[in-house]
Image (cartoon, grey):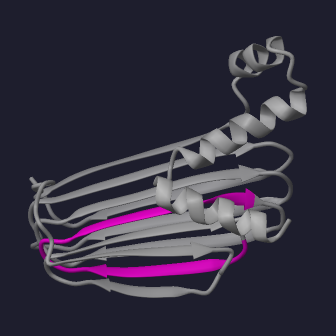
Amino acid sequence: MVIMNKLYKDRKVINIIDDNTNLKIEVEKDNMIIINCFFDNIQDMQIDVKQFDDSYLVINYAGFIRENANVNINVDVIGNNNKTVVNTRTISQKNHATFEVKIKANESTQNNDIIEDLKAINEEGTVTFLPVLQVDTKEVNASHFATIGGFDKNELFYLESKGLSTNKAKDILKRSFIENLFSDNFLKMLNDRKEEHE
């Protein structure tokens, strides 16, 4: 089992806002990398990660789908004693996006924890999740979750009962759905960027 209170030799946070450039990253031994991605308009993107021994990787990917897109996230766990977490939070406002999230735990690796947590709200568009856990070893703790749905009617009703319009209530729920994924620092970056463009 991975020790979560471990002091990593190096800790990096990579923040990506509206930049669909493909990524290739290696998480070296005793390192921690957190990748925060937010897109006002999700487009095609490929993220490839190799994860070595005693490391911790978190990918938080969120945004709005406004046009057809394919997003591929591939993590190759080739080391031991790693923690790997991939989270997505997407809102399909129109058109369609496919997310293929593949995490592979290689043969002969040990003591790796792997979590895929993929969630989407279909508003006027659609989302397809292809969560893949390729586990070639018995020495792994792996789980994945995929949820695609609409707005919670009880939450909408509650907000509307407070005098909010349906559109305003949906905006609050969308913001909450995405913001719960990110740290305060990243949310501040998003708000500062929004103010710059207003």
Toward the top, the furthest residue is 161
Q: Position of residue 128 (x, y in %)?
A: 66, 55
Task: Please name the residue shown 53% across and 44% down the image.
Answer: 180
User: Magenta stretch: dominant SS?
Assistant: strand
Q: Is residue 156 visible?
A: yes
Task: Please name the residue shown 21% across and 74% down the image.
Answer: 106
Task: Please name the residue shown 57% across and 57% down the image.
Answer: 187
Residues in magenta?
43-64
Q: Does the magenta stretch include residue 51?
A: yes
Q: In which quarter of the image is residue 49?
A: bottom left
Relative to 94, say whether 122 is above or below.
above
Q: Where is residue 191 in the image (x, y as percent from the top left)?
A: 67, 59
Q: Is residue 177 magenta?
A: no
Q: Give the left or right position of residue 185, taking residue 93 as reference.
A: left
Relative to 4, say whether 76 is above or below.
below
Quarter of the figure with the C terminus: bottom right
Q: Quadrant of residue 61?
A: bottom right
Q: Position of residue 77 (x, y in %)?
A: 25, 74
Q: Where is residue 122 in the image (x, y as percent from the top left)?
A: 75, 43
Residue situated in front as seen by the camera: 142 or 4: 4
Q: In which quarter of the image is residue 17?
A: bottom right
Q: Can residue 61 be seen in this view?
A: no
Residue situated in front as seen by the camera: 108 or 112: 112
